[in-house]
Amino acid sequence: MGKRRTRDRNSREDVEIDLSGPSCRHIKKGTEQAIFKKLSGNADCQWTICQDCKPEDKVDNGVPAQDSETEDSGPVWMCLKCGHRGCGRHSENKHAIQHYETPRSEPHCLVVNLDSWAVWCYICDDEVQYSQTGHLAQLLTNLKKLTTPEPSKEPEKSLKESPVKSPQSSSAGKESRGVPVKGLSNLGNTCFFNSVIQNLSQTHCLRESLNNIVEEKITLRIEPDASSNLAPVSVNLERPGPLTLTMCQLLNEIQETKKNVVAPRELFSQVCKKAARFKGFQQQDSQELLRYLLDGMRAEEIRVSFKNQYALPKNLVDQVFGGETTSTVMCQQCKTVRVFLVSGARRRRGGGGGGEGEEKEEETQEYTVVNQDPDSAFQTLAPRASPEKQECSVQSCLFQFTEVETLTQNNSLLCVTCTKRQRAGKPGADSKKNVYTDALKQMLISSPPPVLTLHLKRFQQTGFSICKVNRHVQFPMVLDLAPFCASDCKNTVEGDSRVLYSLYGIVEHSGTMRSGHYTAYVKVRPRCVRSQSNGLSDQGSWFHISDTSVQPVTESKVQSCQAYLLFYERSL
C-alpha cells in the first residue's frame, strides 16, 4: 500500500509539472511536425545563415560566401511551421519578422533561436515556456539532432568549408581549448545567479585576490612595553567568512575541474543565508544578486578585521571593484568651488530575520577652493564630444551622467560663502537668513576602478506597472573613460589622456517581466597579456553560456545581444 501511494503521488506531481509548463496558446497552430521530414532531406543546409540575406552572393562552387555580412546579422531564427530561416529583429533586414508578417491562411508565429534554442511567439510577443514532454519539446529535440553535426563528420565538414586556416585562427583555437569554460547547473530559476558567477569566474584579479586572502595566514604580533619584561605574543587571526571561502572554492573549481558542468549549490546556499530574499527559487534580478554577493563578502572581511582589532588598508571588494567619484559644485555668484569626494560607501541590509534595518555609512570629504578659475572647475581628462540625438550607447549614457547641471529654483544651492558675507555686511534681522543661489554641478570619476561594472536600466516603472525596456544599447569592446574623468584623476599615466577598459563579460536578459532568462557572454583570455595601443588584445575567444550550455560565438553576435550588465577590465 505504501508503495502504491508513493507511485500515485509521483505520477500526480509529473502531471502537474507537465500541465504548468506551456504559456502560449499558439503552439499547435504555429508548429508543424512534418517540417522535420522536409528539412532532413536538405543535408547540406547551412543552419546558421539567413536564407534571405543576399542569396545572389555565391562562390563559383555554389557555397555562400561567409563574409562579415552574415556574421553581423546576429542569431538565426527558424520558423516552426515551414522551416524558414531568417535574421532577427536586431539585424538590418529582419527577415524573420518579414516572414511572419506575410499574409497566410495559418500563422507562422513560432520561431526558435538556433543558437540558444529559445522559442518565441510573435503574436504573444513573448518567450514560450513549454512542457518538456509535449510535442513542441519533441520537435525541438529532433531539430537539434538534425542541425548538430555528428562528431565524426564535423572535422570533414569544416575542412570542406574552410580548406585554408590562418595562423591566428589556429592559435586562438589552441588557446580556447587550454582555458576551461564550464556550465553551471540550474538549481531552480537560478539563471540570474549563474550568469553573474560566469562573469566573476573570468575576473582574473578577483580570483587571484581571493586565493591570496585564503592562503595567507595573517599573524598579529603584540610587542609589550620594555618595562614589563614580558615576551612578545603572536596571535593567528581568523580566516575569511564562509561566503568568501565558498566563493574562492567555486571559482577555482570552475577553472580547474575536468567536468563540463559544475553545481554551485554551496555558494548559492551561502548567499541565501546572507540575503533571505533569494530563497524559494523565484525569479530574481542579477544586478541585485551581484550587489548582495559583493556586499556580503565585504561585510565578512570588515567583521573579521574589527573582531581581531586590526584594520586592513582596503578590503578585497574595493580593491577589485572600488572607485571614487567627485561632485563639483560652483556658486554662480561668488564663484566658490566645492568638491565633494565620496571615498568609500558601505551598505548593510537586514537579513530578513535579524531585525536589522538598512544602514549606510559613507566617508565624504569636502574641501573648498577659493579664487579658482571658473573655466577650469569642470575640466575633464580628455575633451568631450556631444553624442547624436538618436544615439543610444554606453558613451551617450555616461555623457549624460557626467553632464554639467544647473541648480536653480527648488534645487538652489545654500552657499555658505554668500551667507557669511551677507551676515558680516548686514548685522541684524537679515543676518540669520541663509542665502540660496544658482549653481553649477558635475559628477566626474576621480579614481577609476580596476574592474568597471555598468548596469543598464532594462526595467521601467510606469504608474503601478513595470515593463521591460527592449531598446538596443550599443557598447564598445574598448571603452575610454577619459572624457568622463576629472582632470586630476588618480591612477593615470602622466602625459597620457586615455583611460581604456576592455570588455570581457556580459549578462543578458531575454524575455519579459513575467518570464525571462539570464545568459552570460564571457571572453576567455590569458591573464597577463599586454594590450595594443588602442587597448584591445587580439588573444581570447567569446563564449555564450546558458546554464549548462556553452557555445563559442563571434564578436559580432556578442555586440548584437541585449546587454543588462557589462564587465570591463582596465587595460591602459
Image (cartoon, rainbow, N blue to C red):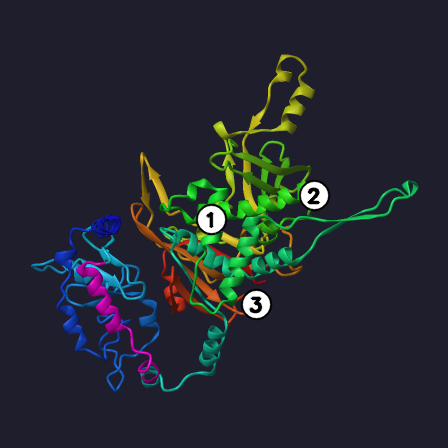
State left or right for residue 429 relative to residue 548: right
Residue 516 sits above or below residue 416 on the image: below
Q: Position of residue 500 (x, y in %)?
A: 55, 60
Residue matched to label 3: 527
User: Residue 475: which quarter of the image?
Assistant: bottom left
For image coordinates 34% across by 68% down, the residue present is: 72
* Vertical position of residue 222 compared to residue 117: above or below: above
Q: Secondary structure at mark 1?
A: helix
The magenta segment: 133-156
Q: Which residue bears the numbered disc 1? A: 269
Cα separation, mark 1 vs mark 3, equals 30 Å
Could you tell which of marks 2 and 3 lies nearer the N-terminus? 2
Q: Position of residue 5 (x, y in %)?
A: 23, 48
Where does the image place residue 249, in percent across and percent down from the top left?
A: 54, 58
x and y percentages locating residue 236 in the rendered image: 72, 50
Task: Say whether residue 148 is left or right of residue 350.
Answer: left
Give whichever of discs 1 and 3 has the lower sequence position.
1
**Amino acid carrying mark 3 in the image:** Arg
Mark toward the start of the polypeptide (1 vs 2): 1
Q: Which residue is mark 2?
A: 308
